[in-house]
Image (cartoon, helix red, strand yellow):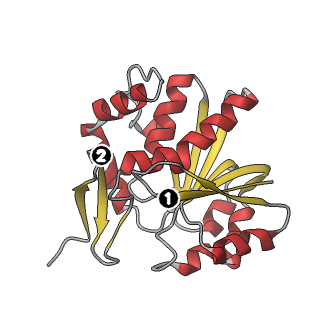
Amino acid sequence: MLEDFVWIQTRDSSPTLWNNALGEPFRSFKGAFTESWAVFVEPCLKSISEAGRKKVCFGEFGLGPGTNWLLISAALKSLGVELEYFAIERDKRSFEMGLDKWRECLDQVSNFLTERGLEPGDLSDLLSEKFQPVIFESIEEARGSKLRADFWFHDPFGFAVNPDGYSLDVLSQCKSLWNEKVFGVSYACNKHFQLALEDLGSCDVRVVDLGDRRLKRSRLEFSS
């Protein structure tokens, strides 16, 4: 019997998990770290820097092995910004596998950030329980907490295999976990998702060209 998840190496040499049930990788074959940085991490770092923020709360819908969490946590640690992080993820197995893998990859993470102008320093405690995200199995469970996101990573599997993850109903529930001023990003740029975000009201929705031939992909940003 095939395992549910299998590690694969992507073109930028960073790893991602392959989901055998869906026949999909969690991150792009073209570069797991590269995609996560360009789509999710970099625009949020720019927003945090421009606002001069020293403490932020991130929420994520679809944690998977935690690539986005890993890179934003390491980046903000290097910048001295305090981070709270929570995620909606029904199946925690992929994240548990991720923690084991990231412990092997901390030097790679450090080198990746250094190449992007950061000084990550010692990341050895990054994967300790103290810094791990709070994981909720459902949006309803997350609503019962006091955590509310300043930044939102909308990152379920793609629309082709998980259209419900981009529906107006799900987005309306996610909105209850956002602060009044929120900045969100997603790799999904399909029209259905854009229209659902617009139907939420009070959201400025835009598609941004990554300008990266290695990815050949745009990202979607939304803010209130």
Asked whether the beta carbons under mark 1 and mark 2 sit within 8 Å of each other, the answer is: no
Seen at 61% across and 30% down, the residue is 82
Q: Is residue 16 left or right of residue 192?
A: left
Residue drawn at x 35%, y 51% as measured from the top left: 31
Percent position of residue 191, x then y? 65, 75
Q: Is residue 132 above or below residue 66?
A: above
Q: Nearer the viewer, residue 91 or 53?
A: 53
Give the left or right position of residue 127, taking residue 204 as reference: left
- Residue 154 visible, this angle: yes
Q: Amino acid at mark 1?
A: Arg
Q: Position of residue 207 (x, y in %)?
A: 65, 59
Q: Amino acid at mark 2?
A: Ser
Point 68% across, 27% down: residue: 54
For label 2, the residue is 14
Q: Is residue 90 left or right of residue 127?
A: right
SS label for mark 1: loop
Q: Earlier in the sequence, mark 1 or mark 2?
A: 2
Q: Residues under labels 1 and 2: Cα distance?
A: 18 Å
- The crowding category of the residue bearing disc 2, from other C-alpha atoms within 10 Å (few below 14, some 14 to 19, many at least 20), is some
Residue 20 location in percent, x, y? 27, 74
Q: Which residue is mark 1?
A: 217
